[in-house]
Amino acid sequence: MASPQSPEGKPTPGTRPLIMRYAARSDVGRLRSKNDDSAYAGRHLAVVADGMGGHAGGDVASASTVLDMIHLDHDDYPEGADTVLADEIQTANSLLSELVHMDPKLAGMGTTVTALLLEGSQLHFAHIGDSRAYRLRGTTFEQVSVDHTFVQRLIDEGRLRPEEAETHPHKNVLMRVLGDVDASPELDLAVLEVEAGERWLLCSDGLNYVPGPVVEQVVRETRNLAECAELLIQLTLANGAPDNVTVVMLEIAEETGDDVTTASVEIVAPAEPAPPAATESAETVEASETAAGEKTPAAAAGTAASAEGAKPAGEPPAVTDPHLGEHLSAEVLREELASRPHELVGAAATAAETGSIPTVAGRSVARRAATMLTHKAEQDREEVLVLPAGRRRWLTILAASVLAVFLVAGLWLGYAWTQTRFYVGEYDSRVAIFNGISQRLGPIQLSSLESVSKLKLDTLPEFQQQRVRQTIPTDSLEAAQRIVKNLEEPDGSAPTPCPSPSAKPTPSAKASPSAKPSPGSTAKPSASPTPSNAPCEEVSP
């Protein structure tokens, strides 16, 4: 049983706080060429994210989301953690939109998220997508999460039996995910009371290829968490593993003296963050080398045994940078990870190891503040020089002339640059390719019609019609032609963005012409063939 708790869920004096013991494993599977799953497990936080988008960035979506949340792994929330977890996931969603804005080739990427945040005797739960959370408490083993899939909606409406779901042709059609379309996706949230001894399993949908009763038996009977996670991975591989599979095993426990002495890493205070002006670039940040003897995230991710440490009473809390998401870099991330025991697996571990961290470095407000401070400092250093009136007049004319030349040259160069761009849009109710950008400069239109396809706009699903009407920018004619081809003959090789829950597209999901997914659906791959206009599919490379 859990230790006595105060009404706020905090340990009472003399009691030992609850922590998570954990083990995490991830495998690319037998058919995929890269791992789009990411997961993190620590003393107070566990997250599983299953990315979608295939070559368009499923690994970027899951890694970005997980790495943006790792700083939550502590139990010091004076205001309570009721909304912290949900706010962080919404922030991660906005980062995905910014990443797509910087790199349009990532358009359509998305990720599921299933996360647990332990505070005192309360477990804060957040979920979106079809990754799953199971709890074993006493003799009861139950699925806590609800799949946001088309078949689950059919089950809820009584139109499909649960045993039919695993073989349904549209079982991978998602209704809700994080991505670059919905600015505020709907999350399933809950606050659950926990007690020492109960177990949790977080997993991506790759584990669905192992029968449910087998999963339950393994969780019940395999006492060692690392062995349990490894066995579930091996069972998935034995069943073909057509998808990536990620497993996080958790056990709620009271901290002990042994936990203190077996802490796997020492606390390292993060370095001072770089000035916002120095992190202006929105491109991937390259990692610097870690000091000799320092444990890196890659080493933690590959450790066979689970890290089972706890913070002793009176120990200073791990230093956590409150603005980690604003200036995330490889060095700051590694110091953040080194400040506590953890396991990081999948695409997030690869990003941390290589330093290729998907992040938006710097926020507009921070950049604006830095610009203002720099400008002020330069003004303070300027010397006042008074010139005769006649000389000032000629200098003014000369300066105006030079400015006019630069202005004309700038406008010409700007226009020339726009003519190197292309976008897909609408012309005469058909999908067309335009050369330039979809903007006007006064009376001047900065684009011209390149070609018009035979594809009528009204034959597309509503959310794809909306994308085309809003224009889809590309950096080359070939890229625009590929987009048009994918709209004309979608074959699962190119993802489409997930519509928001409020949108009402007319979906076509996976393979059966007799079964129609409901509006706003988003699809991930299955073994069945994919008809045209399949929405939001996770693509096999």
Image (cartoon, rainbow, N blue to C red):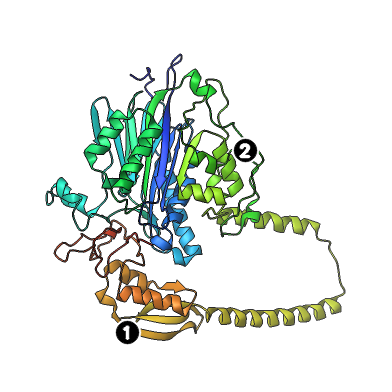
Is 1 on the left-hand or right-hand side of 440? left
Badge 1 local density, few (<14 within 10 Å), some, or many (20+)? few
Relative height, residue 315 to residue 158 (above, below):
above
Residue 104 visible within the image: yes
Q: In this view of the protein, which residue sits in the foreground, 461 or 439?
A: 461
Q: Amino acid at mark 1?
A: Asp
- Circle nearer the N terminus (1, 2): 2
Q: In this view of the protein, which residue sits in the foreground, 431 or 216?
A: 216
Please identify, in this view, whether the residue under mark 1 or under mark 2 is nearer the observer.
Answer: 2
Identity of the residue furthest to the front in this view: 238
Identity of the residue furthest to the top in this view: 14
Residue ID for mark 1 = 428
**Secondary element at tag 2:** loop
Relative height, residue 410 to residue 215 (above, below):
below
Q: CA distance from mark 1 to mark 2?
A: 62 Å
Is 60 on the left-hand or right-hand side of 464? right
Q: Quadrant of residue 296?
A: top right
Q: Quadrant of the C terminus?
A: bottom left
| Pointers 1 and 2 in contact (C-beta within 8 Å) | no
Could you say where residue 376 lies in the image, as x and y percent from the top left? 72, 56
Q: Amino acid at mark 2?
A: Glu
Residue 492: numbered disc: none
Is 216 on the left-hand or right-hand side of 284? left
Could you say where residue 94 lies in the image, as x and y percent from the top left? 44, 54
Q: Residue at x 36, y 76 (%)?
A: 484
Residue 187 visible within the image: no
Relative height, residue 166 to residue 401 (above, below):
above
Residue ID for mark 2 = 294
Q: Quadrant of residue 473?
A: bottom left
Q: In this view of the protein, which residue sits in the foreground, 7 or 109?
A: 109
